[in-house]
Structures are given as structure tokens and as C-alpha cells.
Amino acid sequence: MERIFKAIQEFEKHSVLVLGDIMLDEYIYGDVERISPEAPVQIVDIKGKSHTLGGAGNVAKNLVELGAKVAICGVIGDDESGRIVKNELEERKIESEAVFVDPERPTTRKTRIIANSQQILRLDYESREEISDYLEKKIISYVLQNKESFDAIIISDYAKGVVKKEIVQKITKCVKEKLIVADPKGKDFSKYRCVTAITPNRKEATSVSGTENLEETAKRLLFDLRLKSIFITLGKEGIYVLEKGKDPVQIPSMAKEVYDVSGAGDTVISTICLSILSGLSCQEAAFLANIAAGVVVGKLGTATVSREEIVNNLLLERSRMFHKIVSPSELIQIVAHLKSQDKKIVFTNGCFDLLHIGHIHLLRESKKLGDVLIVAIDDDSSVKRIKGEGRPILNQYERAQIISALDCVDYVIMIEREKLKEVIEKIRPDFLTKGEDYLEKQIEEKEIAERYGGKFVFIPFLGKRSTSQIIERLRIQDSFNK
């Protein structure tokens, strides 16, 4: 998880070329309250209209939203839709030098009629004819002349005629050292031979492979197309990943609510591309892509996802999967993100050996001071030095699991007592707490908090209880029984 958080920050260091079918997605919104007297159809009372980049344009838009530098290569028509596309690209600072105009074909436009938050009709304006040999040469020439400017190439094929086999094969032959990821279309995948990876959906992949078995499908495509990896998107079931030389893995979906799947595939391929560029494995890239797609399908229309949204959902998922237990270095990144959202951080620490009512009281009262409670648990070696031989009774992993099960606790770290000062200085919590039994003692954490402006709070006793007292009572009882 620490690697994933770091990789997300690395997204902004990468430059990606998107090559494919550029579209304009248009949305017409309205209400439906009547049926037409002319025919048995709904009457849409138009309330508004909007447009956004679609197809390869939406891939580029996703990459920009994720922090990357982006250029796009494709073809538009000499029409109003084409001019809107150019303006949209310019507004998002997407390099569009290689967006070529063909006066003989229209700009692909998909007009969706939305009534009462439901899509009721889509109108497509397009040509599916392959682009001319002249435009093919211009695209190949641009890619080869500028290949050093890009860390990766995404091929966004919507079967509208731009992604010709000759273009893909020339690029894969001449740009071997680059990461090339393709979102394929059609029944013939041979044009994608020797790209790095492809991201078909289940229907596309099984149709081409000739088998409904996912593992066999993935293996056939990986071998036949000489790929390094394949990501088969499964909708609500997640993503099936097969990497050369490794066993296949299915990463489950992270979507909570699905409003619109438009553009989810564009989000997946964008996230996978940047994840691999940032050093993540294919499985980690698929996991992160599922997080991103889960956000996008919860939005209406062709949407994108930001790094902040991914991190927010990743933190939620991390807590669910790993029971709130993080490493100190992960904690530093998590707290930085939480503070950017103006969350108040509360920090407390201790041995927490044999959890008792006094511990519960300390933690509950500490949580009341802020939004997020972090508990630092002394590791086993620290407890032994502080408490002596025979301690801890429970090892650090058992203690961390028990503390993380409490609703009032948000994050738990296991740490050597000597390194506690360093962590506190790096995360600078708003509040540090201790039980009032430390009131008369000199506490280094208190001095640190006062230096950076944090508040140190002593939590009143709920009756005098301690783990040592419990252990002594158990020893007496055991001696008595003997």
C-alpha cells in the first residue's frame, strides 16, 4: 500500500501520448412528464446542454486529471464539433499539434438525451471508414519524430477508422522501448500484436479467443499477440489480470453505486498506464484502476477521477482490508492527506498489553478531541525494556489487531519507543494525549508538541487500573488455586 501511495504522487512526472478516435460527448438534459400525441414516445422538456471530450479525448482528459502531461493524436472534421474539441483540448492543456483535420469526414459526436437522471436515447454522428493513407503517414511521422517526448503511448481504439493496423504495427516496431497499452475493438486483435498490454472487456476478449473460459482466453491472447500482460475488464466483477510468467489474478470491483459506466474503460487504461510507469506491478495497477473506475461509475456522464478522489477511496479501502494497521512511513503520507482536508489529528501511545477499561476510556476520550485518532503501540522489544522480563503478555501484532478493532481508533502503528519522537515531529498531530497518571512526569512528547504548537491533553482516570495490576491479581489467583 505504501508503494501505491508513492506511485500516485509519481503520476505527475510522466508524459503520455494518446492515439485514437477522438470524440465529442454531448449531453442534453430535460424532464419527462408527457407522452407525445403523435407517437408512443416520451416528450423531453429540454433544460440544458453540455459537452465534453469523449473516446481518446476522454482518455487524455483522465490522464490530465491524474496529473500527467498529455499529447493527443487523431482526426477530427472541419465542423463545429471539431472546433469544440480543439477548444476543450486547449482548455485542459492537452497538446493537440497532431490532431489532424479531415474535411471529408465528420467529427465523431455522441449525443445523449438524459431525462430525470436516466439516459433514454443516444444519437451518433460519425464515419467508420478508415482514414486516408495521407493521414496515416502524418500520424506515423508525428509519433516517430516525437517518440522521445513520451514515456508511454495509449492506443484508444473505438473502431471509428483512426487506429489502422498499419499505424499500430509501425509504431510497435519502431517504438519498442516504450510502454504501449491498447484498448482494443473489433474481432481481429492481430493489429495489436507486440504492444505491451491490452485492456479488452470480457465480451471482446472471449469473442476473439473463441472460448468463454477467462484463463484460457487470457493465455491465448497473451501468447498469440506476444503481450507482456493483459487486463480483462469484468464490469462489476473487477479486472482479470494475466502477466507473462505469472499466475492469473482477479481483482474485485470497488464500485459502491453504479450510475453510469460511460468512459469507465478510459479511466481504467489511463490508471493502469500511469501505475506501471510509476513502478507498480500489473496486479497493483489493476487494483488501483478498480479504485478509480469505482469512483467514475458513481458519476453521471463521461466522467474522470482525480488523484485526490483515488487517495480518499484508497484510504477507505485500506482501512477495510488491513484493519487500520499501517507502517510509520505510510502514516506520514496518510496524515499529510488528512491535514489537506482540514482534519484534526489526535495521537496517543502506550504498551496496551492486556486491554482493560482504562485503555478504552483513554481512547474514547482522546477521539472526542478531533476527527482522526492514531494509536502508537510500543513494539515487543520496547515493552520488554520498559516493563521487564515476561512482558508483553500479548505480542505486538495481537495488540495491534485488538486496538484496531475499536470503533474510536482510526489508525494503529507498531513502533520502537526510541523512534516515537521522530514520527510525532513528522506528522505533528493537533492533540497528543496521555492518562493523568503521567501528570507529574517529564514527557518528551509533551515538549515536542509545545514546540510546534500542538496541544498535550491529560485524560482523567476512570478509576485506577493498569495491566500490571491485572497481571498481579492473576498471579495471586493462580498461586491461591495451586
Image: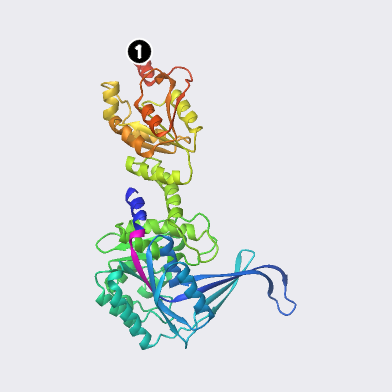
User: Of helix, strand and loop, which mostly describes the magenta segment?
Assistant: strand
Which residue is disc 1 drawn over?
Answer: 476
Based on the picture, tell me whether residue 14 belongs to the magenta stretch.
yes
What kind of element bears circle 1? helix
Q: Position of residue 475 (x, y in %)?
A: 34, 15
The answer to whether residue 184 shows anywhere in this view is no
- How was this image coloured? rainbow
55 lies above or below 466: below
Give the amino acid at mark 1. Answer: Ile
The C terminus, quarter of image:
top left
The foreground one among 30 and 43 is 30
> In the current view of this chain or complex, which residue is farthest to the right?
37
Location of residue 471 in the rendering, given as x and y in whole percent from the top left corner: 35, 19
What residue sits 31% from the left and 81% below the top? 141
Q: What is the crowding at mark 1: few (fewer than 14 residues within 10 Å), some, or many (at least 20)? A: few
What span is in magenta? 12-19
Is residue 248 shown above or below 102? Answer: above
For the residue pair 423 and 94, the one nearer the viewer reads as 94
Q: Quadrant of residue 479?
A: top left
As drawn, is 320 to the left or to the right of 116?
A: left
Q: Position of residue 21 (x, y in %)?
A: 43, 76
Q: Residue at x 42, y 44 (%)?
A: 319
Percent x, y of residue 58: 46, 69
Left or right: 225 in relation to 264: left
Q: Is residue 125 magenta?
A: no
Q: Is residue 176 visible?
A: yes
Callout count: 1
